[in-house]
Image (cartoon, rainbow, N blue to C red):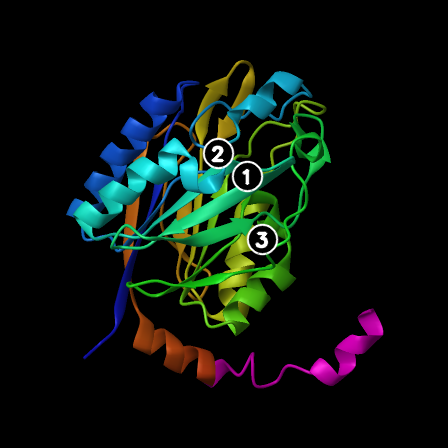
């Protein structure tokens, strides 16, 4: 029997109201499930505005312990109802420590644990080092009821070694929840195309589907450019959004065919790990 995996992502414009955003994401998850989705990916930190534009201590109050986050609690119930996997991006408080994290909720509603963003950016409009510690979980691949899912978070997507690590851990797909758009220091700089190309490269080099979910719209003067997409294992974009649309993208993949293709290309067979020590 052929193994398939149907992946979906959500692109939307969040408000700054936690419950409103959870409700709206839940509506989109239902929409994706109706189209046959097994895994539905919302954007990064979707429960409010992207607050890392500046350094304001009041924003630490947005964080919750991961088991108690209202998005985790409510979307766990929805995942069980619909039988879908939902990777939930949150601002996590762990005692005195704060992380940009993701909780993988399995299709029976069980939270499988937490991944903490490994690579933390710091620049104009994206001052995340003020709010988040570098993750301490290592890269993770989740053995869900629907398939083995690897997830990086936004800035992680620029690092090919993160994608390769998750692919070598047996991921069937790589998912990237994201918040990216305008560069306040340079109004002429548009990174949308290179953002896509980086992840399309991960798809090619690991012969694996890649899903990227971005927010869209103007949040108090910072514009996020959307362009969420799903790429196939050749790096081709099979379905995508532009810069203003809101909704869900859904695409189905044949995992057995992908496995044969990956073996045929030999990217993992031909790795020269004996040479990598020179980099350390």
Q: Is 266 within the magenta?
A: yes
- Quadrant in which the N terminus appears: bottom left
Answer left or right for 113 relative to 220.
Answer: left
Nearer to us of marks 2 and 1 is 2
Label 3 secondary element: helix
- To which quarter of the image does residue 22 belong? top left
What residue is disc 1 on? 192
Span colored in magenta: 264-280
- Within-10-Å neighbours for mark 1: few <14, some 14–19, many 20+: some
Residue 155 against residue 238 in the figure, above or below:
above
Residue 198 image label = 3
Residue 45 image label = 2
Question: In 3D space, how far apart are the residues under numbered discs 3 and 2 (Cα atoms)?
Answer: 21 Å
Q: Decide which of 87, 180 is in the foreground and name it.
A: 87
Task: Name which of mark 3 and mark 1 comes first in the sequence.
Answer: 1
Question: In 3D space, how far apart are the residues under numbered discs 2 and 1 (Cα atoms)?
Answer: 19 Å
Point 66% across, 48% down: residue: 119
């Amino acid at each position: 029997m052929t193994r398939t995996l149907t992946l979906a992502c959500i692109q939307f414009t969040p408000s700054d109201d936690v419950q409103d955003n959870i409700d709206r994401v839940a509506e989109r998850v239902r929409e994706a499930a109706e189209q046959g989705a097994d895994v539905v990916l919302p954007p990064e930190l979707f429960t409010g505005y992207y607050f890392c534009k500046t350094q304001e201590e009041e924003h630490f109050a947005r964080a919750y312990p991961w088991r108690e986050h209202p998005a985790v609690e409510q979307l766990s119930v929805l995942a069980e109802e619909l039988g879908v996997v939902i990777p939930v991006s949150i601002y996590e408080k762990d005692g005195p420590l704060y992380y940009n994290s993701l909780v993988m909720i399995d299709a029976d509603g069980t939270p499988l644990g937490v991944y903490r963003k490994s690579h933390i950016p710091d620049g104009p409009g994206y001052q995340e080092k003020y709010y988040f510690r570098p993750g301490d979980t290592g890269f993770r691949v989740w053995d869900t009821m629907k398939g083995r899912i690897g997830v990086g978070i936004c800035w992680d997507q620029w690092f090919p070694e993160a994608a390769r690590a998750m692919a070598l851990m047996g991921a069937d797909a790589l998912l990237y929840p994201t918040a990216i758009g305008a560069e306040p220091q340079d109004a002429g700089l548009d990174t949308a195309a290179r953002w896509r190309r980086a992840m399309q490269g991960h798809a090619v080099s690991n012969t694996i589907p890649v899903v990227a979910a971005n927010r869209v719209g103007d949040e108090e003067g910072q514009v996020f450019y959307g362009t969420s997409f799903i790429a196939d294992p050749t790096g081709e974009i099979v379905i995508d959004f532009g810069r203003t649309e809101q909704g869900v993208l859904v695409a189905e993949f044949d995992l057995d065919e992908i496995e044969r293709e990956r073996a045929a290309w030999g990217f993992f067979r031909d790795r020269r790990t004996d040479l990598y020590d020179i980099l350390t």
